[in-house]
Image (cartoon, rainbow, N blue to C red):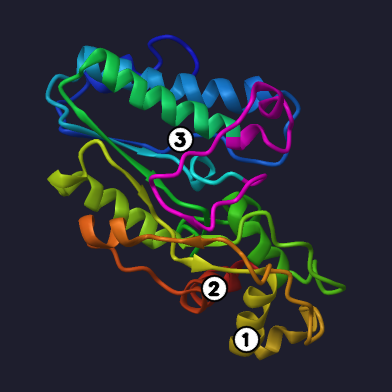
Amino acid sequence: MVQDGAFDEAVRCHPFKYVIHTACPYHFNVTDPINDFINPAVQGTTGILKSVKEYAPLVERVVLLSSTATIMNPFNHAKVYDESVYGETTWEEAMSPRLAYRASKIYAEKAAFDFVSAEKPAFDLVVLNPPLVFGPAQRHLTSLDSLNTSNHRIRDMVLGQFRDGLPPTGPVYLFADVRDVAEAHVRALEVSEAAGQRFMVAGGHFSNKRIVDVIRASYPDMAGRLPAKGAPEDMPSDVYGFDNSKARKVLGMEFRDLKTCVNDSVESFVGLVK
């Protein structure tokens, strides 16, 4: 993704009208913030935009999967987050393994909007900003080791890795169901009014305690793998709010609640639990 012209051949192959860019690294094994996160995010994003502009003249819209990492300010939280809020970072923060992913998303989203503003391509841009994404595993998945990173916490609960106590939930207390995120991509392609906009694609608040309580109630046979009842709630009483009304009004989105998301996630894991 970071090589010049990496997408040229792909976009030359067949005529098409839309591009969805979702590829961006997210993992916990950070050794080099620049090469692990920042360069792939920024150069991958600008690279696909350059290739589309140069070699895919029929493209009308590009949808970029960004993140609420580009909205939220973890060191100075807003009372309510929506698309009008922009996350800020510094290069020093970007070099921290703990904060590098957030910085990479901020830099990549800004680079995308800057490209469209400067280059005036024939296509427009829509940006989607989900928080942590939970939900059912892909149908072709053969091992829980291959789950997306956000789903690891639900997987680890089911596997009994938190039997002796839950880890802290934060700093993010918002989630989206993967099926809602997928639907938002389709609607972002179809709705003309979405052009040039960013959308907060968030379903609701969550905490590790709330997740484990859903699993215990719906899957009582798994109780022995879960922490004891009465685990403390670590979501702050004054946790930041969120406003997803723009996604609801413009894209026509409706969002799944946490119980539905967790239950369907666990159900999809059951056949792979050993």
The location of residue 47, given as percent across then percent down, is 39, 18
Residue labelled with disc 1: 219
Q: Secondary structure at mark 2?
A: helix
Give the farthest residue toward the top.
4
Q: Is residue 220 above or below residue 266?
A: below
Q: Quadrant of the C terminus?
A: bottom right
Q: Residue at x 59, y 44 (%)?
A: 73
Residue labelled with disc 3: 23
Q: Nearer the viewer, residue 128 or 268?
A: 128
Q: Amino acid at mark 2?
A: Val
The Cα–Cα distance between marks 3 and 1, rounded to whole angstroms, is 34 Å
Q: Amino acid at mark 1?
A: Tyr
Most common SS among magenta residues: loop
The Cα–Cα distance between marks 2 and 1, rounded to whole angstroms, is 11 Å
Q: Secondary structure at mark 1?
A: loop
Mark identifier at residue 262: 2
Q: Quadrant of residue 91?
A: top right
Q: Are marks 2 and 3 in contact (CB under 8 Å)?
A: no
The location of residue 77, given as percent across then percent down, is 60, 51
**Mark 2 or mark 1: whose residue is earlier in sequence:** 1
The Cα–Cα distance between marks 2 and 3, rounded to whole angstroms, is 24 Å
Q: Is residue 212 above or below residue 255?
A: below
